[in-house]
Image: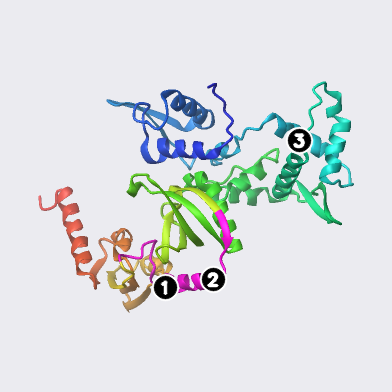
């Protein structure tokens, strides 16, 4: 198969990108899902988009490929190129120019009228005599309406199509769009709008810029559409914990959670089979199919309102039981940023001042282990850590002992 930069189906590219650059950094010999030729073709396609950010490392198993991106030095997310590299059939290109040319005036036409004009003005001049059927034209018109290129107006029993008017001055919004394109989970929309401008702002830089969510943009859009319409979805999930085995789940999507620490995205949904709220990592979701409207959507949303009162991250613990945790900190007079930080990051907990240099953080949560990475950032100021889960406290101090021993403590 000849190599082509363009793609018809983004799902395959998403899988290659995650297998090579997110999960595995696999070499040519390690990747056994496809043939060696398929590996080389996909690798060259990815290099055409990301060549400036690809690095290679040789090891005994072969050459491994990985991404190396310094987010402080790039003004735009390079992964958006993959979402824009879509291929088109000869019919797609033909219909695009013919339809938009016929609708350049103020007058709108029905699908049948467009088909007749297309033949009279263009297709009759070719010897082949080829003429598309009316169903193909209707599908293309429906696609263009969904993209906002055309608008459809009901006249009698038929739809009349005309070109959409775009009176928005994108230049006035250039800086806002540029920020949106890098900061929003669906920033590819902003990046596509920036492509319409001759010059784009490049003065935004991000200390922590999580770009891998770009690969999940299509899945995220489908889930947000389902949430907005209160629809049920059938979702194919392939968790690494289950060996990558694809499992189909029927769920009611409720909320999208985005980690501010690592940029990872999660779907919170009501699972019909297990009859409870569950989280799914977005990068493990392979496919989403919107099915039927959920009549009890508000009831499931009410479950979430109660559920989130004790939720720290994305874990409900083993059986949704709640543990009580108290963290006492001491800080100096010049470290007033410590209580301010606690107030800012307390989530479902609360902060109590004991004296001017001592405060206590109190929280009731499902899974106290989720708090430990955050609690460790206060090491050196921790006076006391108390929790109803004694094993968790024991583990915390054992980790500290191991850390102390690792760095030569006691010598």
Q: Which residues are magenta?
A: 290-318
Give how far apart the Cα atoms at labels 3 and 1 are.
53 Å
Q: Quadrant of residue 37?
A: top left
Q: Nearer the viewer, mark 1 or mark 2?
A: 2
Q: Quadrant of residue 22?
A: top left
Magenta-colored stretch includes residue 207: no
Q: Residues within 10 Å of mark 1 (few under 14, many from 20)?
A: some
Residue sitting at x 20%, y 56%: 399
From the top left corner, tell me how far across and down residue 21 is, in percent: 42, 37
Residue sitting at x 14%, y 48%: 408
From the top left corner, tell me how far across and down residue 108 is, in percent: 86, 47
Residue indicated by mark 3: 95
Q: Secondary structure at mark 1?
A: helix
Give how far apart the Cα atoms at labels 2 and 3 are.
42 Å
Residue in front for this viewpoint, 26 or 152: 152
Residue indicated by mark 2: 296
Residue in front for this viewpoint, 148 or 343: 148
From the top left corner, tell me how far across and down residue 201 is, in percent: 63, 43
Magenta-colored stretch includes residue 309: yes
Q: Earlier in the sequence, mark 1 or mark 2?
A: 2
Residue in front for this viewpoint, 249 or 342: 249
How many numbered circles does the render carry?
3
Tell me if residue 303 comes above or below residue 397 in the rendering.
below
Q: Secondary structure at mark 3?
A: helix
């Amino acid at each position: 198969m000849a190599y082509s930069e363009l793609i018809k189906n983004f799902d395959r590219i998403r899988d290659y990108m995650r297998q090579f650059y997110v999960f595995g950094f696999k070499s040519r010999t390690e990747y056994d899902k496809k043939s060696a030729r398929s590996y080389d073709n996909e690798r060259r396609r990815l290099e055409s988009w990301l060549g400036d950010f690809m690095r290679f490392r040789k090891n005994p198993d072969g050459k491994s490929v990985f991404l190396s991106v310094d987010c402080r030095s790039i003004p735009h997310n390079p992964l958006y190129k993959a979402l824009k590299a879509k291929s088109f059939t000869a019919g797609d290109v033909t219909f695009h120019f013919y339809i938009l040319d016929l609708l350049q005036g103020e007058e709108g036409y029905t699908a049948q009228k467009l088909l007749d004009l297309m033949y009279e003005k263009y297709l009759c001049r070719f010897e082949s005599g080829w003429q598309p059927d009316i169903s193909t034209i209707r599908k293309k018109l429906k696609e263009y309406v969904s993209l906002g290129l055309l608008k459809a107006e009901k006249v009698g029993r038929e739809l009349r199509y005309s070109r959409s008017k775009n009176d928005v001055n994108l230049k006035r919004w250039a800086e806002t769009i540029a920020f949106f394109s890098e900061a929003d989970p669906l920033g590819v929309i902003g990046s596509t709008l920036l492509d319409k401008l001759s010059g784009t702002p490049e003065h935004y830089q991000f200390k922590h810029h999580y770009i891998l969510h770009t690969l999940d943009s299509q899945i995220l859009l489908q889930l947000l559409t389902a949430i907005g319409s209160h629809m049920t979805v059938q979702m194919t999930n392939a968790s690494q914990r289950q060996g990558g085995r694809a499992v189909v789940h029927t769920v009611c999507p409720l909320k999208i959670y985005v980690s501010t620490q690592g940029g990872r995205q999660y779907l919170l949904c009501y699972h019909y089979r297990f009859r409870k709220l569950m989280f799914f990592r977005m990068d493990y979701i392979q496919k989403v199919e919107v099915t039927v409207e959920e009549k009890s959507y508000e009831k499931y949303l009410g479950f979430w309102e109660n559920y989130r009162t004790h939720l720290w991250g994305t874990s409900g613990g083993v059986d949704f039981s709640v543990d009580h945790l108290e963290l006492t900190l001491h800080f100096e007079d010049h470290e007033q940023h410590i209580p301010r930080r606690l107030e800012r990051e307390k989530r479902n907990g609360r902060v109590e001042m004991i004296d001017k240099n001592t405060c206590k953080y109190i929280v009731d949560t499902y899974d106290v282990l989720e708090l430990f990475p955050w609690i460790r950032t206060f090491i050196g100021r921790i006076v006391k850590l108390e929790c109803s889960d004694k094993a968790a406290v024991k583990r915390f101090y054992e980790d500290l002992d191991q850390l102390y021993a690792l760095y030569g403590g006691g010598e």
